[in-house]
Structures are given as C-alpha cells and as structure tokens.
Image: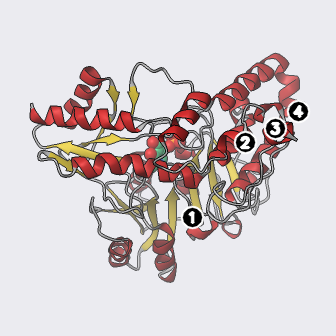
C-alpha cells in the first residue's frame, strides 16, 4: 500500500487543480516514481517555512550561489520532471525515427489528453504549441478579421502580442487602439468599466493579458469577457503567467481563445505552449500553418507544425503530476504571501514606488517597483552585483520598473535579504 501511495498520485479532493476541476488520474509509470505523495500531506500553509524549505530541498536542484527572484522567465523543473525529461531525451535519441514514427504519436496523444483533462476542456479544443507566443499568433493571425475591425490593447500587455496586432495593422487589416491601463486600479469593476467605455461599433477583439508580465496585475478576464460578449466583442486571453500560478478555470474565463505555456508555472521543460479555441469557434479560424487535410471544424487544422520537441511533450504528464501534488491553491497562496511581505514593507519606504496593486484579486506573486533616484536597470544591476539577488528591469513608461518574481523554492529569508538590499540602495 505504501508503494501505491508513493507511486500513484492520489486524487485528493482539494488543492490539486485549477478551480473546480476534477483531479486527473495519472498512469503508474516510471516518470512519477520520484514524487512521494507523503511529502505533500501537510497543509503547507503559505507561512510554513519548514514545509516550503523541505519541498525546495527535496524537489529542486538550485545553484545556491544566488537568490533567484526572476522566476517569471521560466520555472526551474522539479527534480522528478528533470529526470523524466532526461530519460525522454535519451529514449527519443536512441530509438530515433522508429520511435518517432511508431511510439511517439500515441504518447503525444495521451499527453494531450492528460493536459486537456487538467484544463477541464476537450482535447479537441487544444493544440500543443512551442510556447504562448506561437499559440496566440495562431489565434490572432487566424482570426477572421474584416478590414476596419478594431482591437483594444494596453501598455501592460505582452510585447509579442502587441507586435502581432501592430503587424496586422501595418498590413491594413485592422486598427489597433492602445490605452493606458492604470498601474494601481482599485477594483475589478474599475477595469471592466474602462473596457466598457473603450468599446465602439468597430471593436472586434480585446487582448487580455490575464497576468501582466510587467507588474503582475491580474485582470478580471471572465467579467470583461461577459461584458464584451454583450457588445459582440471577443476577448483573446494571454494566460502565459496565469496557468499554474493562480487558480482559474479555462471554461469559466468565458474566453474563446486562450494562449498559455507550461514552462513558467507548470514546471515543464521549455518548449510547450497551449492554444485553446472553443469548439464552435474552430470552424471560422484560418490556419497560420497550411493544412488542407484536416476538417474545417477540427483543431488539428491549426497544428501543422512539422517535427516537434518529442521529449518536451513526453514530459508533460510528469510536470502536471508534480504541479497537482503541490496544488495551485498552495502555490498561489505561498507566492502571494512572499510578494506581500516585501510589497507591504517597501511601499512604506521613502524613495520606493511599488507599481503593483496589493489586493489579492488584482495581484499574484509577481510585483514590480522603482526607486525615485535610480533607473530600473541600475537597481537590478546593483541587486545582482552587490547582493547576488537576481531580478529584471522591465520597460514601463519612461522610468521602467524592476520585476520581482519569487517561486515556491524561495524562502522568507530570500525576501528579507531583498528588502534589506533595496533599503540600502535607496539610501545611497
Ligand atoms: C504575459 C506573457 N505572455 C506571453 C509570454 C510569452 O510566453 P512564451 O515564452 O511561452 O511565448 C510571456 C513571457 O514572458 C508573458 O509574460
């Protein structure tokens, strides 16, 4: 029985999954053997340093020579995931074309099914892409815009999606309307009202960056989408930073087009993204990569990719398994806690400007700040050179900002060192 508990992921009723979705049963396989369910039995409260330290020590291989507060680029693979990935690389390499032609299609289809179950959608509504940028490009460039259609974006959206819409505008296909999103909105309703006022008869699509990569702002996707729907407007949702970091249900987002990735907060190796398109919307989409063989109503028509990264896709079930074991509720609570510690302290500090709202429904683990007397690049450089604390400066207006992104393997100590370092710099 002990073995079973170790080798199978228990279908716990809570804390495992994206909101309200059933837990996914994972096949007994070598890849999940290193995940010991007993390690995850404790409540694992956000403030329980002992629990999080033990998870970090046992499941993450960290180069302990610096404090990594730049986990927004991509996440470190937990050890069981890295081990599965390494095995998968070796297997695909050793067995070469025989593997790719005979075994891989079934393995990839099974991984896709598990991913769809994790997201609570049909596997006929998703495709696995290389990343979120590719996913959203397929959605944006495949959307049946008519000349003169208007798209709404803002300065906190991800630059690659802005670029794609601007490219379509340059080709004369659409008009892009960019507005200034407040950095510190007071409520979800304030954001919904902003969009309501911006919609015109020409508006066809709103780009919604679920969690901003610049300041971590969470926008109320479902509420905006419901309001937009009443006006006949679609939303395209960029959930690259939301999937795995905050609790949400794909279906309840009300969004018919969603791009995500698995290498930020799910812990999969770099190179897998997801495009979700609601079943009844597939027919009207144009394919970015030519495919005349798939049915017009089949999501496969959007996924003519050529050779894909076998091992990355094969590892998806293991990364989902680990992520489920930790649970999105525990993860998001921990990240929010670590963020709140530094935000609450530094926002009181003269010379520091925090540019992320504090409210739990408007922010997650990512938050940003700037110092009144230094450029953001100078701040990030100083933190790294003088204190071995790695953050990143981001473009935001003329002053920029420094983005701080803890992960589950960061400790309260890391955050305290970061706070002390910023205070020291602001006094210089
Ligand atoms: C909000 C947001 N959208 C999209 C992306 C792009 O993700 P990917 O690297 O998977 O294309 C990022 C990456 O940082 C992001 O922060």
Name the residue: 25% across, 26% down: 381
Name the residue: 65% across, 44% down: 40
Q: Are marks 3 and 4 in contact (CB under 8 Å)?
A: no
Density class for disc 2 (Cα within 10 Å; few <14, some 14-19, many ≥20) is some
Q: Nearer the viewer, residue 110 or 335?
A: 335
Q: Earlier in the sequence, mark 4 or mark 1?
A: 4
Report, in whole angstroms, how far the alpha carbon at label 4 lies from the one at label 1. Answer: 37 Å
Q: Earlier in the sequence, mark 3 or mark 1?
A: 3
Q: Secondary structure at mark 1?
A: loop
Q: Would you name the residue on which mark 1 appears?
A: 144
- Front label number (2 vs 4): 2
Judge whether 251 appears above or below 274 on screen: below
Q: Would you name the residue on which mark 4 appears?
A: 103
Q: Would you name the residue on which mark 3 appears?
A: 7
Report, in whole angstroms, how far the alpha carbon at label 3 lies from the one at label 1. Answer: 47 Å
Q: Secondary structure at mark 3?
A: helix
Q: Percent from the top left, x then y, of residue 37?
A: 72, 42
Q: Is mark 1 within 8 Å of ligand 1?
A: no
Report, in whole angstroms, how far the alpha carbon at label 3 lies from the one at label 4. Answer: 24 Å
Density class for disc 3 (Cα within 10 Å; few <14, some 14-19, many ≥20) is many
As drawn, the label of residue 285 is none
- Front label number (4 vs 1): 4
Q: Are marks 2 and 4 in contact (CB under 8 Å)?
A: no
Density class for disc 4 (Cα within 10 Å; few <14, some 14-19, many ≥20) is few
Please tell me how many numbered marks the rendered image carries: 4
Report, in whole angstroms, how far the alpha carbon at label 2 lies from the one at label 4. Answer: 29 Å
Q: Nearer the viewer, residue 274 or 373?
A: 373
Q: Would you name the residue on which mark 2 appears?
A: 37
């Amino acid at each position: 029985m002990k073995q079973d508990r170790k080798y199978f992921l228990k279908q716990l009723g809570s804390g495992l999954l994206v909101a309200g979705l059933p837990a996914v049963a994972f096949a007994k396989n070598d890849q999940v053997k290193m995940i010991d369910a007993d390690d995850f039995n404790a409540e694992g409260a956000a403030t329980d340093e002992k629990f999080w330290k033990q998870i970090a020590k046992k499941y993450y291989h960290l180069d302990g020579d610096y404090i990594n507060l730049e986990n927004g680029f991509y996440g470190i693979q937990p050890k069981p995931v890295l081990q599965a990935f390494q095995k998968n690389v070796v297997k695909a390499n050793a067995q070469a074309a025989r593997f790719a032609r005979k075994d891989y299609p079934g393995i990839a289809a099974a991984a896709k099914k598990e991913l769809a179950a994790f997201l609570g959608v049909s596997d006929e509504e998703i495709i696995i892409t290389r990343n979120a940028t590719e996913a959203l490009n397929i959605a944006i460039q495949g959307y049946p815009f008519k000349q003169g259609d208007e798209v709404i974006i803002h300065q906190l959206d991800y630059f690659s999606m802005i670029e794609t819409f601007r490219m379509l505008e340059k080709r004369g296909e659409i008009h892009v309307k960019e507005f200034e999103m407040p950095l510190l909105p007071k409520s979800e309703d304030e954001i919904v009202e902003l969009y309501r006022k911006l919609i015109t008869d020409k508006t066809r699509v709103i780009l919604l960056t679920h969690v901003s990569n610049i300041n971590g702002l969470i926008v109320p996707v479902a509420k905006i989408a419901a309001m937009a729907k009443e006006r006949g407007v679609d939303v395209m949702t960029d959930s690259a930073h939301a999937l795995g970091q905050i609790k949400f249900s794909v279906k309840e987002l009300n969004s018919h087009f969603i791009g995500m990735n698995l290498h930020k907060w799910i812990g999969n190796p770099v190179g897998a993204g997801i495009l979700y398109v609601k079943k009844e919307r597939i027919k009207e989409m144009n394919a970015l990569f030519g495919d005349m063989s798939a049915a017009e109503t089949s999501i496969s028509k959007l996924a003519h990719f050529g050779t894909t990264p076998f091992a990355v896709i094969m590892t998806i079930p293991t990364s989902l398994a680990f992520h489920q074991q930790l649970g999105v509720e525990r993860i998001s609570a921990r990240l929010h806690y670590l963020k709140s510690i530094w935000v609450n302290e530094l926002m009181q500090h003269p010379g520091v400007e925090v540019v992320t709202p504090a409210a739990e429904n408007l922010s997650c683990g990512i938050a940003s700040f700037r110092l009144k007397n230094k450029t953001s690049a100078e701040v990030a450089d100083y933190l790294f050179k003088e204190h071995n604390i790695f953050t990143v400066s981001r473009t935001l207006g003329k002053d920029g900002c420094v983005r701080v992104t803890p992960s589950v393997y960061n400790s309260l100590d890391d955050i305290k060192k970061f706070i002390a370092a910023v205070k020291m710099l602001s006094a210089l």
